[in-house]
Image (cartoon, rainbow, N blue to C red):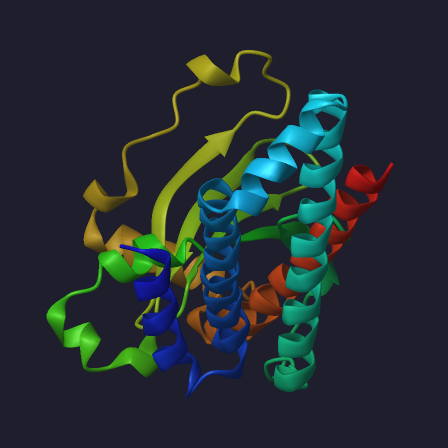
Amino acid sequence: MSSASLAARLLRRAASSPRLSTLARRCAHSSATSRPLNCLHAAAASSPSGITARRFLASQSPVSSSKISADENLRRVIDSEIECVVESEEGSAQQIDLPEDFPFEIIDNPGDQSIVLKREFAGQTIKATVYTNFDAEEDLNNEDSDAENDEDQYKPAVQMVVTIEKPEGSILEFECNFNDDELAIENMRMLNRDSNDKENLYEGPPFSILDESLQKSLHRYLEVRGIKHSLHDWLTDYMMGKDEKEYVVWLKNMREFIGK
């Protein structure tokens, strides 16, 4: 799928989702800014002035002049991208309210791609490390025809690794995915905190082949500890907001490096 096509489809979705608008505009902006550079390059190569410029540069250091031109161009593109994203953030700024009876401490370290939800429960320490898949092109390409007619339902995948620890003994770990319908447990394992050979540790059978009653009981086990489907919408909004902030910081760090 081309950048322009992806941008167009995301922009249609953005009409009903303020958070998606940033992602859409980012794609659209990247698609738009690439064309003038190609046009300028083609014009310089075919015009007499382009020939004159090449002759003039030949009398200087080609490597040095080329580096300055490339660096300055990259700085301009980065500045333009930062401006685009910041404007989108300001236009879509909204308060993200916590879910009702939210029991977790939020650990959100700048520069990290994930956040951690942490709480104490009945002598246990529960930690949920949350990741988000923002591969928009892959998500769009994997949609079926029915999803095309229900575009406002699009949300990126939220993935979570939950660990439940007691003061001593093993650690229970769950790998989970959120979707619009449910919290899906993809896998679970018992980890020996004292074992140095974790790769060779027996982790149990795949979750999907466990007895259905055992699967339901494990889902309930997570629910009473606060890991449940009602977190889905809040986590999606929070992680999309975090992605926007981290992207701007990443661009500014790149600009600082290029400017040195």
Location of residue 100 with respect to 194 vertically, above or below: below
Residue 122 can be seen in this image: no
The quadrant of the rendering that contains the N terminus is bottom left
Q: Give the residue drawn at x 29%, y 79%.
A: 151
The image shows residue 118 at horizontal and vertical percentages of: 69, 56
User: Along the horizontal axis of the image, is 188 left or right of 19?
Assistant: left
The quadrant of the rendering that contains the C terminus is top right
Count every numbered label the image shows and give the total.
0
Residue 124 can be seen in this image: yes
Residue at the right extreme of this rendering:
260
Q: Give the residue drawn at x 23%, y 45%.
A: 208
Q: Nearer the viewer, residue 105 or 169?
A: 105
User: Along the horizontal axis of the image, is 44 left or right of 119?
Assistant: left
Location of residue 155 with respect to 196 vertically, above or below: below
Figure quadrant of residue 247: bottom right
The image shows residue 83 at horizontal and vertical percentages of: 70, 69
Q: Nearer the viewer, residue 168 or 12?
A: 12
Q: Give the residue drawn at x 64%, y 80%.
A: 98
Location of residue 169 with respect to 126 vertically, above or below: above
User: Along the horizontal axis of the image, is 36 left or right of 258?
Assistant: left
Q: Give the residue drawn at x 46%, y 70%.
A: 24
Figure quadrant of residue 46: top left
The image shows residue 184 at horizontal and vertical percentages of: 34, 57
